[in-house]
Amino acid sequence: MEKRKSIYRKLFSSTFYISAFTFGGGYVIIPLMKKKFVEGLKWIEEDEMLNLIAIAQSSPGPIAVNTSVLIGYNVAGLVGALVSLWATILPPMITLSVISMFYSAFIKNAVISAIMKGMQAGVAAVITDAVLNLGSNVAKKKELISVLIMLIAFIMTFFLKVNVVLIILFGGLIGTLKVVLHERRNKGGGE
Amino acid sequence: MVLLKLFWSFLQIGLLSFGGGMAALPLIQNQVVDLHGWITLKEYTDLITIAEMTPGPIGINAAAFVGVRIAGVPGSIIATVGCVLPPFLIVLLLVRLYLKYKNLSAVQGALSGIRPAVTGLIASAALTILILILWGENGFSTNLESLNFVAFILFAASLIVLRKWKPNPIFIILGSGIVGGAIYLLL
């Protein structure tokens, strides 16, 4: 019981911390979550994390919220999911409620906007670092199909603006075909 | 009554926004500006600016921002809960299916194709953000004058530190906020 409570507490504080210091949308927060829960706490494996991100993207709603709910559920069941849900939404909810009350002063404050601008460059570096790690992990497995799927998915979203859900379906379809063809070939070889 | 309307509006936003924050923008605008007139279009564009500079997904930022204006703190809570309730339930349903079937070889195969696709998606989003930060809203250009040099140097220095010493990213973000903030104010 004590152990469970300490997991909830760790889950809440880690998620709250990440949520409070992450500016911008889901793609900023995902690399940070990956760093914390996969590399830092080692609660989730990298492959499992990517599966969870795919589920988060396949359902509606903010990706950051979806991903952290899934991490919470994976680590500590339904209570875990609720704990990470609140830890994710409280920081922006409190921040925006306060800003909403003083918003015209906030928008014009030169110091605040200069610091925010500086932070953005740091955020860009953090995301780039995470992407380099993820990309090299795909490349390290030395599977041509995976590398191709990654490149095609990149081109389809970045240049062609294809819907995210379609790209996930595309990846899933190619992956399934690969396994089915492989099994069929193995069966053929065995006879 | 107004609380109920807020809840219902943001429930729809949460339910229908597939594909993350940017996909939610037109839905939010439709609900809070066009349908209900809770905030003006000018306030809505300010809201997007604020959302870019503050933590959290745009949907939650909009819910809290609009909720407070319309019905105080209870409004903020009700709107936010409305926004996350549908995705919360859907995501839990999907993960239960995933946990139940993840050992089937077809599902394994599908996931092995989805993982690199997700990596490609993240790379695309990262590049979009990178271009926005280094070149501004007009997008990438080979013209050196349109590159924000302060941002570029902060970015390059941060990336080198990250690759070499692997510090906690929060320190990188705070550090570049302090250094960058000072430079921008002095320039």
Image (tube, coloured by chain):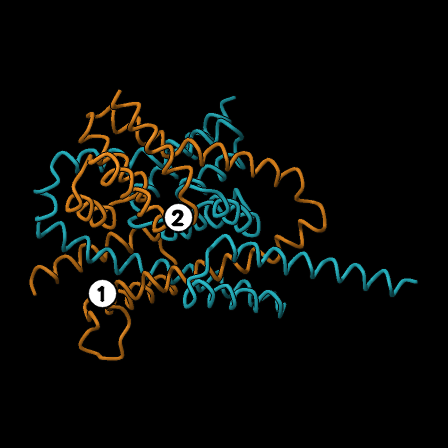
Chain colours: A cyan, B orange
Picture layout, residue B128 above or below residue B35: below
Indicate the position of residue B119 as horizontal and vertical percent values.
49, 59
| Residue at 69% from the left image edge and 45% from the top image edge | B103
Indicate the position of residue A105 as horizontal and vertical percent values.
7, 42
Q: Secondary structure at mark 1?
A: loop
Q: Which mark is residue B136?
A: 1
Q: Which chain hosts label 1?
A: B
Between marks 2 and 1, how big is the CA–CA gap? 21 Å
Query: Is residue B105 shown left or right of residue A41?
Result: right
Query: Is residue A29 shown left or right of residue B6?
Result: right
Residue A128 or residue B171, whichever sits in front: A128
* N-terminal label among 2 and 1: 2
Q: Three-letter amino acid code at disc 1? A: Gly
| Residue at 36% from the left image edge and 38% from the top image edge | B13
Q: Judge if badges 2 and 1 mark residues of a common chain.
A: yes
Check whether the beta carbons of the residues at disc 2 and disc 1 lie within 8 A of each other: no
In the rendered image, which quarter is residue B17 located in? top left
Q: Which residue is mark 2?
A: B20
In the rendered image, which quarter is residue A182 located in? bottom right
| Residue at 31% from the left image edge and 38% from the top image edge | B60
In the rendered image, which quarter is residue B180 located in? bottom left
Query: Is residue A156 shown left or right of residue B83?
Result: right
Picture layout, residue B75 above or below residue B129: above
Q: Three-letter amino acid code at disc 2? A: Gly
Indicate the position of residue A76 as horizontal and vertical percent values.
52, 31
Q: Secondary structure at mark 2?
A: loop
Q: Residue furthest bottom?
A: B143
* Mark 2 residue crowding within 10 angstroms, few (<14) / some (14–19) / many (20+): many
| Residue at 15% from the left image edge and 46% from the top image edge | B42
Indicate the position of residue B59 as horizontal and vertical percent values.
32, 41
